[in-house]
Image: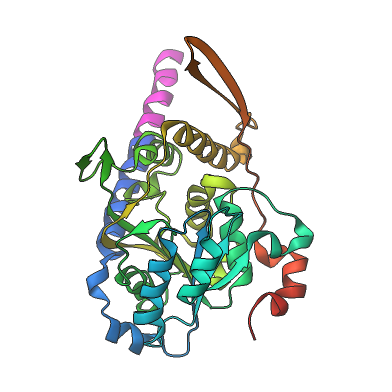
Amino acid sequence: MGGPAGSAAPHTRRVDRLREQIAVQLATQRWLRSRSYAAADFPLGEVRRLKADHQVSVVLPARDEAATVGAIVRAIRDELQAAGIVDEILVVDSHSVDRTAEVAAAAGARVVAQSAVLPELGDRPGKGEALWKGLAASSGDLVVFLDADLVDFDPAFVLGLLGPLLREPDVHFVKGMYDRPLRLAGEASPTGGGRVTELVARPLLNAFWPQLAGVVQPLGGEYAGRRAVLEQVPFAGGYGVEVGLLVDLLRLLGLDGMAQVDLGRRVHRHQDDEALGRMAMQIQLAASRRLTGEGLAEPGTELVQFRRVDGRLVGAEIDVDALDRPPLRDVAAYRRHSDLARPA
């Protein structure tokens, strides 16, 4: 009698697991239908009408982006700030050694040095730090984040990201999706970009947070959210910040609290393979830290990268650790000095 009863338990678990998978897939499909938009759905006139008394900040983290940041800022200033849609353009200069700060300021942005924001909390390297401090230093109740290395920037990116927040009161975070062409050795692949997305981020999300499987560009740097929500979640350090935000906001809001917008085509500067390796590990660290509460051991943080030099293998051991910054609402220095950090 023990045999049949014992064999039934694994079968029941398999059936339950299959039901869970089907339920997640159906929820993802439902979300894709109800929470996916196109930038063209939100023309300038409608966004201006919907904006009402909202204050909009556009935040660009920038490190050595003098070649592109000026054109982005000017496009936002001339089309969106002039139309009363964008109230603040903030560039966070993340220790640039080129003319990023000067170019951004000349184009019309307010520029803050990353190290000058909440200085009593110190300063860490990486994109997550620049975004966290950009949120702290900006003033809008709606915050749009854009990468500063975009080429042929279209202000419709900002309109598309704002649209669902303004039209749908239950949407609190909007992610951009797009085609990402990749140019290597003079040849262009129309959808070849996003290598770390496909090899690292998407498999991680599908394995552990399958509700996010419908997010087309989980690592994309173009997204927007309500300040009241963004201040409730930590910001992972380095390039783990985008995955961290998706996972933490999923837990906070549920899938229906997020949306995505098709922005068309995104062209930007690509990094070499070694840099992509470091990026990939930071993403894995951010994901792993969000699994530690579910029994996963704390991950190691050192990455060894080998290269051939004069016929010899030379290894470099790199600490890619990028610790999370806490939710801003929990930071006493932010609450105490927020009026000083923001323009009057």
Left or right of residue 296, residue 262 in this image = left
The quadrant where residue 154 appears: bottom left
Asked which colour scheme the image uses, the reply is rainbow
Quarter of the image with the N terminus is top left
Q: How many numbered marks appear?
A: 0
The quadrant where residue 314 appears: top right
Residue 94 visible in the snapshot: yes
Residue 155: give x, y in percent of width and height. Answer: 33, 72
Magenta stretch encompasses residue 7: yes
Residue at point 32% right, 50% down? 216
Mainly helix, strand or loop, the magenta region?
helix
Residue 322: give x, y in percent of width and height. Answer: 62, 43
Residue at point 37% right, 58% down? 150
Residue at point 21% right, 42% down? 188
Residue at point 53% right, 50% down? 241
Residue 37: give x, y in percent of width and height. Answer: 27, 66
Magenta stretch encompasses residue 218: no
Quarter of the image with the C terminus is bottom right
Magenta range is: 1-16
Location of residue 125 with respect to 314 vertically, above or below:
below
Residue 233 visible in the snapshot: no
From the viewer's side, name the closer residue of 170 and 75.
Answer: 75
Tell which residue pokes out farthest to the top in this image. 311
Location of residue 242 with respect to 304 vertically, above or below:
below
Residue 341: give x, y in percent of width and height. Answer: 68, 74
Left or right of residue 283, residue 260 in this image = left
From the viewer's side, name the closer residue of 274 and 143.
Answer: 274
